[in-house]
Image (cartoon, rainbow, N blue to C red):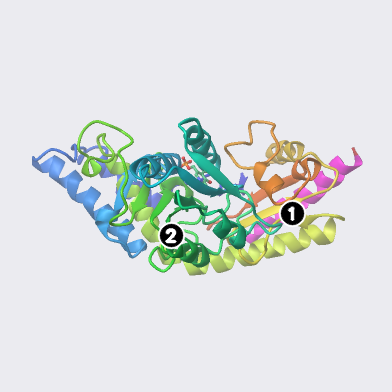
Amino acid sequence: MIYLDHAATTMIEPQVLTAMKPYMRERFGNASTYYEVGAESRKAVEYARKEIADSLDADPEEIFFTSGGTESDNWALKGTMEAYKNKGRHLIVSSFEHHAIGNTCEYLKKQGYQVTYVSVDRQGKIRLDELERAIRPDTVMISIMCANNEIGTIQDMREIGCIAKRNHVLFHTDAVQAYGQIPIDVKNWNISLLSASSHKFYGPKGCGFLYIKKGVRTMSMIQGGSQERGFRAGTENVPGIVGMAYAAKLSYECMDEVGKRERMLRDWLARRLCEELPGARAIGSMTDRLPGNLNMYFPGIEATNLVLLLDEVGICVSAGSACTSRDTTVSHVLRAIGLTDRQASSCIRITLGRHTTFQELNIALQEIIRLVKMLQKG
Ligand code: PLP
């Protein structure tokens, strides 16, 4: 198998799995108990919290463990809007957020909140003037994803943070695709809340975290025990938390080197595809972009057919994001950057990972060329 869908999920690193295993058998204790086997779990959870906090130059008290990106996004939006409802009920998001944000906004609207959607340009960059103009006296928060899951565009985080600070509104970022791939500076970017998910950076599935800056108010989304300082009840997923923290550490250690390699391989693939296939082009900014992300448009083909044919020869890519690839609606991300529905349904997402080799990419290149030509002939 040639796996080129790392934006959907990544395979857990063997060392991460090894670090997790003891917490499933011999150190299985509940982190809320006082005897030794429980205390060991508590120690591991707090060590992991410190490691994650260090990766963001944050305080351990600012890190809250969750079940993943979707939960972190839901908590960030619902919990914070609720906590500040006396200030206002207005929220600003971009028009191409992940459904974890988009559908949470739909829910909030049904609860009486107002949401403004800020548009993005053809490169996938937020229009900053439009963002600032959208802020009203009752605006509580801006939520803008750090990097897009379909086209990999990285936003001008520092500028967005300055706009939030200048206008006294909170700034949440969905960093599920960005954390572990690119450096993140919560202080310099003025971030109030940040969501991340372990399975996107070679950690286990079902684990994530929400960074909440000290002083930012929030409400608990899950009622029950007093775990996570009463904000997120439920027995801690100790193996998951241990694995996530270890995976984060590994990602930060190799970030520069992996980023350089992925960027070089990605640009090579884009260039070769454009040389070989008339009309083919890369979608979105090629500079402010996650290193491993490539989204390619091939005129006259149906991307879902190409994905299925590639699967038959053992190559995994996707048409749209993983969460939408099973439905047939046109990508709201590609629409948001100005593609027609016809163009949007002719795009595939290829996402490289830290173990992707040149040999694998070369095979993928040949197969994509062959299959696109075949589909274009009809
Ligand atoms: N936000 C973004 C940008 C994502 O890409 C994803 C997953 O693809 C999520 C949120 C949801 O994360 P999780 O799968 O951990 O629930």
Q: Is residue 366 magenta?
A: yes
Quadrant of the rendered image containing residue 54: bottom left
Pointer 2 local density, CA inside 10 Å: few below 14, some 14–19, many at least 20:
many
Q: Amino acid at mark 2?
A: Ser
Q: Is residue 317 visible?
A: no
Residue 229 at what x, y percent from top left?
A: 21, 44
Name the quadrant of the N terminus.
top right
Principal secondary structure, stretch drawn in magenta: helix
Judged from the image, the secondary structure of the residue bearing numbered disc 2 is helix
Tell me: is circle 1 under 8 Å from ligand 1.
no
**Mark 2 → mark 1, Cα distance in angstroms:** 27 Å
Residue in the foreground of this view, choosing between 258 and 45: 45
Report the span colored magenta: 357-377
Quadrant of the rendered image containing residue 188: bottom left
Q: Earlier in the sequence, mark 2 or mark 1?
A: 2
Residue 359 vertical position relative to residue 239 in the rendered view, above or below: below
Give the mark count.
2
Q: Is residue 117 magenta?
A: no
In the shown orientation, is residue 295 left or right of residue 55?
Answer: right
The dot on residue 365 is 1
Image point (16%, 46%), residue name = 40
Residue contact between numbered discs 2 and 1, judged by CB atoms under 8 Å: no
Image point (27%, 42%), residue name = 238
Q: Amino acid at mark 1?
A: Leu
Judged from the image, the secondary structure of the residue bearing numbered disc 1 is helix
Disc 2: which residue:
251
